[in-house]
Image (spheres, rainbow, N blue to C red):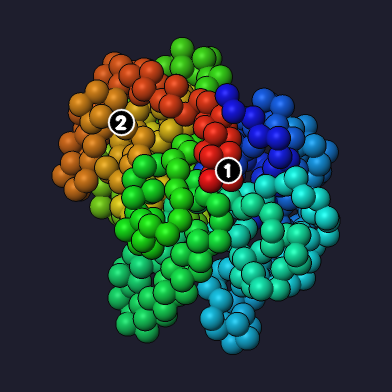
Amino acid sequence: MTKTKRKIFWITQKWPLPADDGARRATYHLVKGLTAQGIDLELCAIVPEGEKTDVAEAQRALGPSKVHVVTRQPARHLSNLLLHPTIPLTFAPFAPLAVTRQIEAAIGDRKDLVVVFDGLHAAASVLTRPEALGANLRSLPKVYRAHNVEKNLWVLGARQKKNPLASAFLRYQALLVGAFEKRVCELTKLTATVSDIDSENFRLSYGGGFTTANTPIGIDLDTRAARESFPRERKILFIGRLDWPPNRDGLKWFLENVWPEAVAAAPDLKLAIAGAGDGEWLKPFLGLPGITFLGRVAEVAPAYQDSIASLVPVFFGSGTRVKAIEASSFARPCISTAIGIEGIGLDPATNYYNAETKEDWLRVLKNLSIDDARKRGSSAFTLIQEKFDPIRVAGRLLENLEKAIQS
């Protein structure tokens, strides 16, 4: 494994704990994979003013040599839209120079750092106004850890809006996000994508004037107890951030169009829904037969242990689905669209169930066999255990990082 002589200064766009959504779990496993190998890493988390943080807990859980807490103003979308119309709306709270100056103070005059932006919002804290950076931060090598092609989420959101004014607003935001995303790729030494598909999407979106390298999402594989325990009832699990648009829209479609008919035909079917984020929109569906709402769970293992398959009704977005990798790590097959398992390499013939249309979903659910789910889940675990091992993934990031810096 290649080790960097540089210290890594890792900037996250939110407090990383508890690791109860896909983005946080991806950060958790990658940072922990790096520090477990003796990499000297400082964590810099950007949080809204007043949010509670536990530095000691972060050091214990993730292993950084130091934790910096940078504060930002809460999101004020209307004022940001009026005062900063050319800054993407959700990036505006990260963009003020006051945030940048806190990061510069944490870095000081050290020359041996490589700065990693864990997500595009983290990059906004430094690269919104690159001309305003101090000489040292400007000169340090930087890496963009891209969770997905952000512009595409806004484009797809605009297409889904029926209100023409709302659609036009989201298209404008997509243009702003795309311009900033392209600039970040060009100003960093490396854009570390989560899959080869995303690397290609970046090139198609923004040309080839920057370096990309695939660094998959690592996942904890210490799941033996859950893998060896398999329930004897047909319960499936949805787990994911409930207010993230691809999750929200996909699950809402499923609950409106598929679940009532599926459970009417097969009353033994059960569905557990777990996740953080604003789930108010779920309330009308929680009275449907067979549904249990778990809300935010401190540990995901018990939820997977009680289920025979994981539900991934995702119809848009990019990046790699943490929930699909995570389900496979517990030897639970996904019932998913092709886009929901994109970049992972799962095969619908052997280790997941593919469903695209309402008819597909109904067929899979009605015919779902406990024994077949167990067999497919075991096959999925075998496939992902090497590719997404967090130590291997961290080593791959280091190799890509060193190559990019040296070039």
Say which amino acid is labelled 1. Answer: Gln
Q: Earlier in the sequence, mark 1 or mark 2?
A: 2
- Of the pair 201 and 300, the residue shown nearer to us: 201
Q: Residue at x 26, y 47 (%)?
A: 258
Q: Nearer the viewer, mark 1 or mark 2?
A: 1
- Of the pair 38 and 303, the residue shown nearer to us: 38
Q: Which of the numbered marks, if any, corresponds to residue 364?
A: none
Disc 2: which residue = 346
Spatial CA distance of label 1 from label 2 is 35 Å
Q: Residue at x 46, y 50 (%)?
A: 211
Say which amino acid is labelled 2. Answer: Leu
Residue 282 as seen in the image, left or right of residue 11: left
Q: Residue at x 56, y 56 (%)?
A: 188
**Residue 94 drawn at (x, y percent):** 66, 66
> Of all residues shown, which one is farthest toward the bottom?
82
Circle 1 — which element?
Answer: helix
Disc 1: which residue = 406
Circle 2 — which element?
Answer: loop
Category of crowding for the residue at label 1, using alpha-carbon neighbours closer than 10 angstroms: few (below 14), some (14–19), many (at least 20): few
Up/down of 115 relative to 127, above or below: above
Q: Residue at x 50, y 59 (%)?
A: 185
Q: Quadrant of residue 307?
A: top left
> Of all residues shown, which one is farthest toward the front?
407
**Residue 241 drawn at (x, y percent):** 51, 49
**Residue 261 drawn at (x, y percent):** 23, 45
- Of the pair 274 and 265, the residue shown nearer to us: 274
Up/down of 378 relative to 160, above or below: above
> Of all residues shown, which one is farthest toward the top?
228
